[in-house]
Image (cartoon, rainbow, N blue to C red):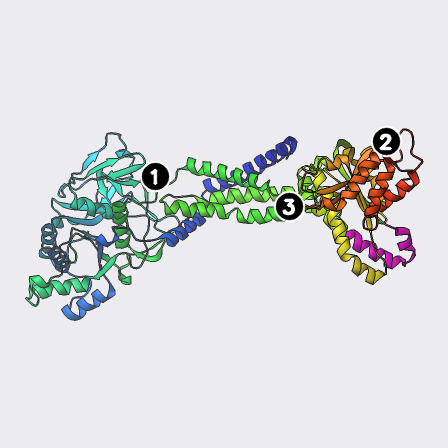
Amino acid sequence: MDHKSFSVRWHDVLIHSVVGITVALLFWFTGLLNGIEGKTFDLRASLLAGRSPFSDSIVLIVIDQESIDWVSENMEIGWPWPRELFGSIIVNCIRRGAESIGFDVLFTENSNFGVADDIKLKNAMLQAGYFTLGSVFPSNASGKSTAWPEDIPKPHYNIDNKLGFLAQLPSYSRATFPVSDLLSEGIVLSNVQHQPDDDGIYRKIHPFVLFDEILLPSLGSGIYLSSHPDAEIIVGQNQIVVDGHAIPVDHTGSALLNFRKPKGTYRFVSAASVIRNEFQFRNNEIGEDEIKDDLAGKYVLFGYIAPGLRDLRPTPTDGSFSGVEINATILDNLLAEDFIRPVTTLQTIFRIILLTFSATFFLTFFHTQRAQIAVALLIPLFPISLAVLFYKFGYDFKLIPIELAVITGTTLSIIHRYLVVGKQERFIRHSFKHYLSPVVINQLMENPDKLKLGGERKELSIFFSDLEGFTTISEGLGAEELTHLLNKYLTEMTDIIMEEQGTVDKFEGDAIIAFWNAPLEVANHAEFAVRAALRCQQRLSRIRPALLEEYGKRLHMRIGINTGYAVAGNMGSSTRFDYTVLGDAVNLAARLEGANKNFGTYTMITEATFNKIGENFSCRELAKLRVVGRKEAVRVYEPLSYTGNGSEKNYQSFHQGLIFFYEGKIKQAFDEFVKTADQDRAAKMYALKCQKLLGNIPESWEGVWELDCK
């Protein structure tokens, strides 16, 4: 890609990327992408949901429909239950060794069974020692309290607010509290008011909020604090650290939850089984040693999952997640320190810019419309992969604005290429598909300036070929048969030339004119040209019997190749032109093709070509040749093979004869050539030449074979 072409493409990349970025930012900042972004987050959460090493330390005791039915049938108690039953659950959890107990239950009104019923629940909570009651509802709407009630003990947390970020937490002007008869020192009050996103899905929570300048933890955070009363809470700008456990938060104080699998992550225990176990113990139906110690060291959360109790909420991994499970997820994330880290606006903008520019620039490396479309369809998979990878390592990734920017930028690139660049490329492909290999065409489309009218002087390897005795061949065939024969022959030869990165200049009847190193540079172009000649001769040898059988004609081809400086370019008018080559080097290649008949050979190359083809080719020197129109003689060679193991020993007599011929020792030369004349046509032609020269050697002998015709 030349400097000018690169500059143009970079300009296109810049424009397409900026448009894509602008469109994405407009849609993102107006909130139009939030819904679909949330859905992609949910897919990532569902795909990667798992358990943490701390999931087994959390047990959920739940009131399900089975519990309601069992209590109704066996205890003849309908819903709502008396608070004494809740107390029995707490006491049973204590007997079974629970580390800490938290209730996701509303107690904002006094019990229908009287104050004594409330006292029984309060005593059970006090007996627990470490108890969290999640019955505080902060709100900015009308509520019962605008200040912390005087009859409810205020919490005393070990808060480090040296950096002054505590005030940045969400602050509420009103709150609803549980009845004061249930409360005393040591009972941690917790916030259970969580708000869903705009689409109704619960993805984020506030681990801590403020009411009346007093810190309120969520139930998931509060149950940890109840069992760690001396835990230090450090409130920072981007995170809240609880007893060394970091909770990353965004600018609103929200934490993004890392949801677990909806089924099988936490152990669920029916409240009915706990109540039954406790009353069996109280009635001496089971002994102390029969109480299972299966809650030892566990955090026990109590809540509702019965459908009629209306505590089911949609989350990324489940459409009917209970509130107690959300609080369990908060606690699990706190213990495992694997909340999803939020992404800032600046981080997302940076990713949008980086990935959009990268995607549109990456497209410039693909030169066909089909390849660009294929790559453009694959490019969106990269941001998706990044989003999954980021989530796996605990980071949020705003996928949709990035995808929108990338897709917009790449789509504009493809449309622009089709309408502007593609028009030029289609012209190039249509004009050159019969003369250049697809590889060369693709390179040419990268540098279309090579097609401008005019030419440049550069070193080329020029190839001329012709069929031996074509006039006789054509006279013996009808026009249609001759056309078919030529098409088969020319197709076979042209395919080889293009495979070897050659440019087919033109066809003149049976003649093929081709060259290498233009319009685009081809390293080792002489090697490509000579290898193409050898392959063409081999291919013709293979198809010769079939052509003979079908057309009754035996085809032999003569090839001449020369390497030298010539002018290559578009020659003609501005509306009609051909890409061709001109110069003395071209004429010499044409002369060599015809010179083959003087030596009985079928492929001849000049010394200039021979010097550039390397050791992989086996060649023999044929002559010092002076063609018509040139004063200087040129050494010419016959390439024998490309294998590198051609047998020079077969031509030892020929080579010795050539030395004698150059030295003017014509008789000795004749004797050497005659030895292989019946096997080697070149030796035979030299023997005939020596016969004519015997006794008639020019005084100024140069060892040159003079051609007297073209």
Quadrant containing the C terminus is top right
Q: Which of 333 and 118 is in front in this view?
A: 333
Q: Nearer the viewer, residue 180 or 193?
A: 193
Label the magenta part by its dominant secondary structure: helix
- The residue carrying mark 3 is 368
Q: Which of 709 and 431 is in front in this view?
A: 709
- The residue carrying mark 1 is 250
Q: Is residue 35 above or below residue 279?
A: above
The reply to whether the magenta stretch includes residue 132 is no
Provide the residue span drawn in magenta.
Answer: 468-491
Q: Is residue 593 above or below residue 117?
A: above
Q: Position of residue 674 (x, y in %)?
A: 84, 46
- The residue carrying mark 2 is 702
Number of numbered tags placed on the structure image: 3
How far is disc 3 from disc 1 in space, using C-alphas? 45 Å
How far is disc 3 from disc 2 in space, using C-alphas? 56 Å
How far is disc 2 from disc 1 in space, using C-alphas? 94 Å
Quadrant containing the N terminus is top right
